[in-house]
Image: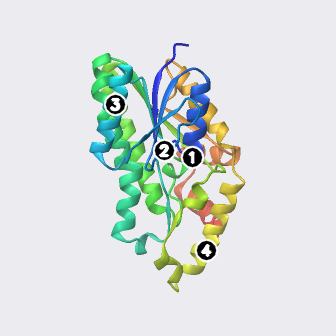
Amino acid sequence: MQPQIILITGASSGFGKITAQMLSEQGHIVYGTSRKPSENIGKVRMLVVDVTNSLSVRQAVEQIISEQGRMDVLINNAGMGIGGALELATEEEVSMQMNTNFFGVVNMCKAVLPYMRKARRGKIINISSIGGVMGIPYQGFYSASKFAVEGYSEALALEVHPFHIKVCLVQPGDFNTGFTDNRNISELTGQNEDYADSFLRSLKIIEKEERNGCHPRKLGAAICKIVARKNPPFRTKVGPLVQVLFAKSKSWLPDSMMQYALRIFYAIR
């Protein structure tokens, strides 16, 4: 396979770091981004990029184009999570969640698409989540941001089809990464007499599932396959088998049963 020029956001840790390493080991020229200065990871060249800042994004993309002459693959992986009740989320928390997980994807796509259109080829891989298939309690704005990525990607895939640009969604379930420890926790929710107990019960379950989740290399392998395939599937679910099967069942399971199962699983009572 011909080496490709690949840019992956959020590559300093977790999914992004391992995926960048795996792609580089396959011979691709890989650039990674992080919000803070980070050392290169093997042959992966790290750039400082704030995906919520369109100028920062454009400068990084222009640098890669200047050095390589093209952009073959964009992997939108950068993301963050906030745990807490939807009702009590502050404007700052909502903005932080949506700006990183959704508008960060929009900014990156807007920056690379002119070059991909000109070349009449390219591939954009947006990392969504099984939480973008179903709303997760006390992770509501995380789910909302991923639902937004899903809808955006569906529309984008149609619009760029005439230019031979492929758009793909990857929906991870629970994986054992630094995401768990880096989750922001709503102080207002933890202090609220109506929500606190339920929130802490659900959060304990969420963190346990994440820490016992799949190894990130499983997701990295799935992304490597998408990069390698000429016509990859639009959606790819990856993670614990039970979670993948449950997410797939949403298309035929009645809403009442789906919500009942989620209430039982996350101890909402």
Identify which residue, 157 or 81, lies in the foreground: 81
Q: Which residue is mark 4?
A: 200
Q: Mark 1 or mark 3: which is in front?
A: 3
Q: Quadrant of the C terminus?
A: bottom right
Q: Disc 1 and disc 2: Cα gap in Å?
A: 7 Å
Q: Please state which amino acid type lies under the numbered disc 2.
A: Gly
Q: Disc 4 and disc 1: Cα gap in Å?
A: 26 Å
Q: Which residue is mark 3?
A: 63
Q: Which residue is mark 2?
A: 10
Label 4 element class: helix
Which residue shows up at 59% across the image and 46% down it? Answer: 14
Q: Position of residue 162 (x, y in %)?
A: 31, 20
Numbered disc total: 4
Q: Position of residue 29 (x, y in %)?
A: 50, 24
Q: Where is 237 relative to 63, above or below?
A: below
Marked residue nearer the N-terminal end (4 or 1): 1
Which residue shows up at 69% across the image and 50% down it? Answer: 213
